[in-house]
Amino acid sequence: MNYRFSLGIDLGTSNSAIAISDIDSERTEIIELTQALGPNRTGEQPTLPSAVYIPHPDEFPAGAFPLPWRTGERGEPIIGHFAREHGALVPDRLITSAKSWLSNPHIDPRQHVLPWKSEIREAKLSAFDCSRMCLEHIRESVRHAMRGKGEDFDLADAQIVLTVPASFDEVARNLTAEAAEAAGLGKVVLLEEPLAAFYAWTAQAGKDWRAQVRPGDIVLVCDIGGGTADFTLIAISEKEGVLELDRISVGDHILLGGDNMDLALAYALRAGLEAEGKSISDMQFLALIHSAGKAKEAMLEDETIAEFPIAVPSRGSSLFGGTVSTKLDRKVLEQIVLDGFFPRTGFEELPQKTRRAGLQEFGLPFASDPVISKHLARFLMRSLENVESSEALRSLVAAEARSKPFLAPTAVLFNGGVFKAAPIRRRVLDLLTGWSDGQAVRELAGYQPDLAVAKGASFYGRNRVTGKGLRIKAGASRSYYIGLETSMPAVPGIRPPLKALCVVPQGMEEGSEVFIEGRELALITGQPADFRFFSSEVRSGDAPGQILPDAERELLEISLLEVDLAAVEDIPAGQPVPVQIHAVVTELGTLELWMKHTKSDRRWKVEFQVRTE
Amino acid sequence: MRSLSVILASVLLALAGLALAPDTLPGPYADEARTILSTAIAGMALLLFIALIAERPKAMAPVQTTPEPVQLPVTEPPESNADADVVNLLSIFQEKGRLVDFLMDDIAGYSDAQVGAAGRVLHEGCRAALLEHFGIRPIREEGEGSKVTVPPLYAPDDYRLVGRISGEPPFTGTLVHHGWRAEWVKLPRLVTTSADRLPAIAPAEVEVR
């Protein structure tokens, strides 16, 4: 296909952004997104807050939120800036972090349950709907902007690259791709966000980037945004004089980010106010969180500021009488942000496990331990485990990097709003240097983090179209397994362990397929069959067809597979059909599983269902 | 009208910045500062008033930097009237920086500390709004007090010469104020305003329980 543009979409947990690259001129720019800024007010902003607000049908008159591509019916959900600002005051009607709900293992992303625990009477939305709606908004806004520039633009002219967290498993990735298709974006290419950041860096640093890395380097891409932390390791090696890059490890989905820091600061400030006998309302507290965030940014940027004044207005019209003032002290800031979230812990200190209460409330699985240093330690330990488990990965990582109980990075690329602050970047480098017994860990220079993920995605799309430029070898970030019942004599009280059959090896490349030989399964026509589906991010050595003795002990259960063998002509109903598993990682980066009849070419697609207990 | 409101908004903000000064001044100067402050506030209110009742223009200055879309799937809303645009601008400064609350509140009964605290709210919010919607920069980059040469055939709104003006241009003199200019304006578009009433500056807010 002849693409003229490459469109990079960063569908963020808190904010989305779009970059477009012209394939011929190589020019990349950010497309500002049209959105409701208030009733009767629309405008363009560089990002679209990923917030969906469900208004009461009588809350706003019809047509109060028109967009260039729709009139805005009464009660229709509102997306973007106004949705976030107004929704903060009406939390029952606001959906945020829909993306994190997509990867929630306990809630079906297609179930209409959002806003979570809300008692509104209007129709609720599913996490899938929210992603689809944000993407629809983005699609229309891009078309509107391109027409405004006088470009003769058609979506079919663009290679679309959509970024997903590296921590997303195949189920969440497939859902994202499906949401994009449902939003009219067609088949999109998926790219892991930390890799997009790395592509952005190579483009921004120009030719210089090759001088900044050398074979044997292990680059940690450390991405902490508003609500999530995402870690990835990239190994640099050399083959016949050419640098090769391999993504060798990805972390878990950690719901911990800059918002947690603002909240922690706001709690401290509120406690200070209360100690002075001043009280603030819940609504003022929201303003306090916002101001605390601003103060944090200003003080971390300019390290000479000893204290930062904060004034929180009342909601009423008297500004002089109702404003409460306080200040953020540098000592408090450092105590909370640096020592609270990034303390100098040892590499052996891991995050506390979630307390398992008997009746646990399902919701977003927020990180129970706020110490990012410990999450990083855990990631690096598990990365070593992953690398050690396969010969191929071991060969990419120098013995020195494997000499500790964790995989030691030699360089870091920082991404995300939290790392705009130099003191936080310094602290993370300090921490890593300390863990490596003083071996210096450097920061990759020349990176402009603003909207870099969207830009990196559009660079990557351009490389794909032209076939030139850098490609980081990635493939499947995890290995995948289906559960097989063990046949053994029944014993009361003993449940036979569930065996696991590896169907997708880690690193399986885009555009490749694998048939699981020698493991025939029997399916009965006319009835749906279920399989439990597992993954692991630390077993790079497992080959397709390999059996693990105990799935539940070693793997993470992520989904339920369902295959429905409709009755077929030449096979009588109720008769077992011998099938073999056929796994495909598409060119676009999504996973498909098929059950193929061993005696014919007929095959049935396996659907991912969410495991709900 | 739009360009007028741009300038007025800038002036208002510059004046509003003064509101911060008394809080930081030492005791003996506080009274004097208070007088300046009241004058500033009065001046602002006056300017605001002028802004609102100023002449109804026919043609609007081409301030939008991005060209309007060529064609749209939905018909473009009717062109909003200029008064509504001014109220729209005012409501942005009210929403972000509580400008109208600040000006309409009775300042006399409050201490400098209270006025200062309110000034911070005003400054932070209005500044953010100003920087978001206007590409604002000084007309002259030189430091105030330095010697500058006024280019011949300057735009009359770019320079004001004071003192003793004589001889041939180009004129040289001391830069008293570096001036401000908006290089671009990016205001939210006001949609579907009814012809017979102006939009609200700030909605009445009701917490429903």
Image: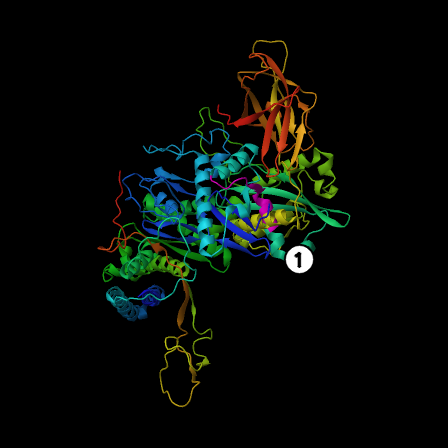
Residue picked out by circle 1: A208
Quarter holding residue A320: bottom left
Which chain is indicated by disc 1?
Answer: A
- Local packing at callout 1 (Cα closer than 10 Å; few below 14, some 14-19, many 20+) is few
Which of the pair B154/A317 is nearer the observer? B154
Which of the pair A129/B89 is nearer the observer? A129
Answer left or right for B35 relative to A293: left
**Residue A196 belongs to the span the image colors magenta:** yes
Q: Which residues are magenta?
A: A183-199
- Residue furthest to the bottom: B167
Amino acid on which the number 1 mark rests in the picture:
Asp
Which quarter of the image is occupied by the C terminus of chain B? top left
Identify the image's colour scheme: rainbow, by chain, secondary structure or one colour. Answer: rainbow
Which quarter of the image is occupied by the N terminus of chain B? bottom left
- Residue at 37%, 33% (x, y): give it: A124
> Where residue B78 appears, x then y in whole percent?
30, 55
> Where residue A461 appears, x then y in whole percent?
59, 47
Q: Secondary structure at mark 1?
A: helix
